[in-house]
Image: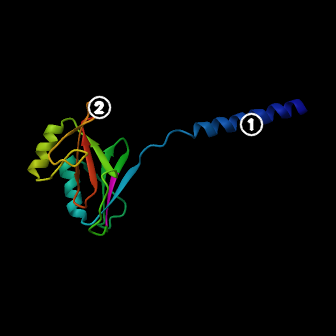
C-alpha cells in the first residue's frame, strides 16, 4: 500500500510540474499605449505615416484609437495627455519598413524633420550590422525610430 501511495504522489507531482512548466511559455506583446493630447491629430499622423489599420476598440468614448501592429499586437492611442511633455530619445517606439529612402520622401512630403541618433538633422544612422535608422517625433513629442531591419 505504501509503495502505491508513493508512486501516486510522485506521479501527481510530476503531472503538476509538467503543467506548471507548460504554462511558462514566453510572453507576447499585446499592445503599446501612447498618451496623446489631440487624438484626431495623432490618429491621422500614425495612420497616414505608417499605414496602420484602425481596429475596433471597446470603449467607444472618442478618447481611444487602436491600430493593429500585426501578430495580435496593437498600438493604443489614448487622449488626455498634457502638452509640453519632454521625452528622452531612449524612450521610443520603433517601426521597421522596407525602404528608408522611400520613407524619408514621405516624411519630407509631410514636412517632418528627422535625424540620426546623435540629432544631426537629415542624417541617417547606420548600425554596425548595416541596418539604417532615423529618429523623429510624433505630434506630442514621443520619439520614434524607423529602420529597415526587416
Query: Does residue 76 belong to the magenta stretch?
Result: yes
The residue located at (25%, 49%) in the rendering is 53
Q: Is residue 129 visible?
A: yes
Check disc 1 and report its element: helix, strand or loop. Answer: helix
Q: State the image coordinates of residue 115 (x, y, percent, origin top left).
A: 19, 47
- Res. 129 mark: none
Question: Which residues lie in the magenta part?
Answer: 75-79
Tell me if residue 105 comes above or below residue 79 in the rendering.
above
Residue at the limit of the structure toward the right, as seen here: 1
For label 2, the crowd category at 10 Å Cα-Cα, with few meaning under 14, some 14 to 19 and many 20 or more, is few
Residue at the limit of the structure toward the left, as seen here: 109
Determine the image quadrant of residue 37: bottom left
- Res. 12 mark: 1
- Res. 128 mark: 2
Q: Are marks 2 and 1 in contact (CB under 8 Å)?
A: no
Label 2 to label 1: alpha-carbon separation: 52 Å
40 lies left or right of 93: left
Amino acid at each position: 500500500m505504501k509503495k502505491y501511495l508513493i508512486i501516486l504522489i510522485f506521479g501527481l507531482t510530476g503531472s503538476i510540474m509538467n503543467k506548471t512548466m507548460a504554462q511558462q511559455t514566453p510572453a507576447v506583446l499585446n499592445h503599446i499605449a501612447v498618451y496623446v493630447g489631440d487624438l484626431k491629430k495623432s490618429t491621422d499622423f500614425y495612420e497616414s505615416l505608417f499605414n496602420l489599420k484602425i481596429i475596433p476598440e471597446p470603449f467607444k468614448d472618442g478618447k481611444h484609437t487602436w491600430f493593429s501592429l500585426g501578430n495580435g499586437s496593437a498600438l493604443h492611442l489614448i487622449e488626455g495627455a498634457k502638452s509640453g511633455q519632454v521625452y528622452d530619445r531612449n524612450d521610443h517606439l520603433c517601426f521597421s519598413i522596407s525602404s528608408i529612402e522611400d520613407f524619408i520622401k514621405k516624411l519630407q512630403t509631410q514636412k517632418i524633420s528627422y535625424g540620426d541618433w546623435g540629432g544631426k538633422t537629415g542624417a541617417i544612422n547606420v548600425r554596425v550590422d548595416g541596418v539604417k535608422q532615423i529618429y523623429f517625433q510624433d505630434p506630442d513629442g514621443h520619439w520614434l525610430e524607423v529602420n529597415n531591419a526587416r
